[in-house]
Amino acid sequence: MGPERSPSVDLSGLEDVLEWLRSRRNTLVGTALVVVLAVLATSFIKRQIRESSYRPWLPLFASASDPWDSSSKDLASVAEQGGRGTSAEPFATYWQALRSLDEKDSARALEILDGFRSRFPTSPLCNETYSGPSLGGPLCSPCGRVVLEIKRVAEWDSLHPQPAANPPPGREGAVTIVTDRGSIVIGLYDDVAPKSCASFRRIAPTWTGLFIATAADDRWVDIGQSEAGIAPEMVDAADGSPPFEPNALSHFSGTVAFRAAPFSKAPWSSDIRVNIATDVSEDGRSTVFAQVLEGMDVLTSLSKAERKADSPQLLAQPLRINEISVAGETSR
């Protein structure tokens, strides 16, 4: 028997396909180019739409990581120039009103809000309602709630003339903060700020290992923060404290107060500030609940200490809290 022959393969069909492809090569290449161009054009258009949507917001973040770091004048410039007629304008205007209030210019804040509600009546800041923990009462919009806050502060100021001095707090139940530079003793006003004092007593024992990290020159020092200057959250704060528990204590040098953004919601930040200088403009706006009895020299020197180059309020060398004593119990 002779050798077996391999079965022959008929390639005529493949040859026909190759011939068909050759004959239509230009058409296929053209179609592929059209598809590629269509994809690129679609991507370009989407990118342009996306960029145009956030372009109005760029001036708000051009000079600061947070618009809240901008002054009311800077925000006015954004609202009136770069943001005019854009989606960013209402928010820049609203933030301008809040910053004016923060800068103690209540009349200007009211003027801005009146104009805001007239120009942007359909904005969520005007027609979305919610209830905040500090004021209670009926639901109202963010703009309406700021107006209520301005009126509340004005009423508080009229009912509480500035005192010559706060009464001294008792030493019973005082909180002692031990640092490498010495101890800081804080006396509490349990009789006039009971909720704030109760919240402080829950917070203070957790400060061991935290820092005194942020300050303003001869004005204030914040205590109980991370080394990066971030205050821990208060997830179990008593209702209404913070952000505000009204009393007649004034913000004299050495007073201790809760600090919180207007109408903040739980969980609150345990932002606690010691006034180095007297600042009665804060009366009725944040809760004084304690007074430094010993260690003001430590805090005053910290307010003048060197800051980090990239943060004007963050101390270059935050002071570590080594130990806390609360009502006779020590936390290490």
Image (cartoon, rainbow, N blue to C red):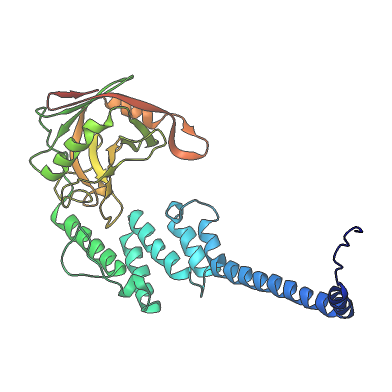
Instruction: Classify residue 35 as left or right of residue 127.
Output: right
Q: Quadrant of the C terminus?
A: top left
Nearest the viewer among 12 and 31 is 12
Residue 169 in the image: state x and y as whole percent.
12, 33
Residue that appears at 22% across and 58% down:
153
Instruction: Classify residue 45 as left or right of residue 6.
Output: left
Residue that appears at 15% across and 66% down:
137
Residue 274 in the image: state x and y as whole percent.
28, 36
Nearest the viewer among 222 and 253 is 222
Q: Quadrant of residue 175?
A: top left
Instruction: Classify residue 64 as left or right of residue 224.
Output: right
Nearest the viewer among 224 and 182 is 224
Residue 13 in the image: state x and y as whole percent.
84, 76
Q: Quadrant of residue 113?
A: bottom left
Q: Quadrant of residue 234?
A: top left
Residue that appears at 46% across and 39% down:
312
Nearest the viewer among 306 and 106 is 306
Residue 264 in the image: state x and y as whole percent.
28, 55
Residue at the right extreme, as displayed: 2
Q: Quadrant of the N terminus?
A: bottom right
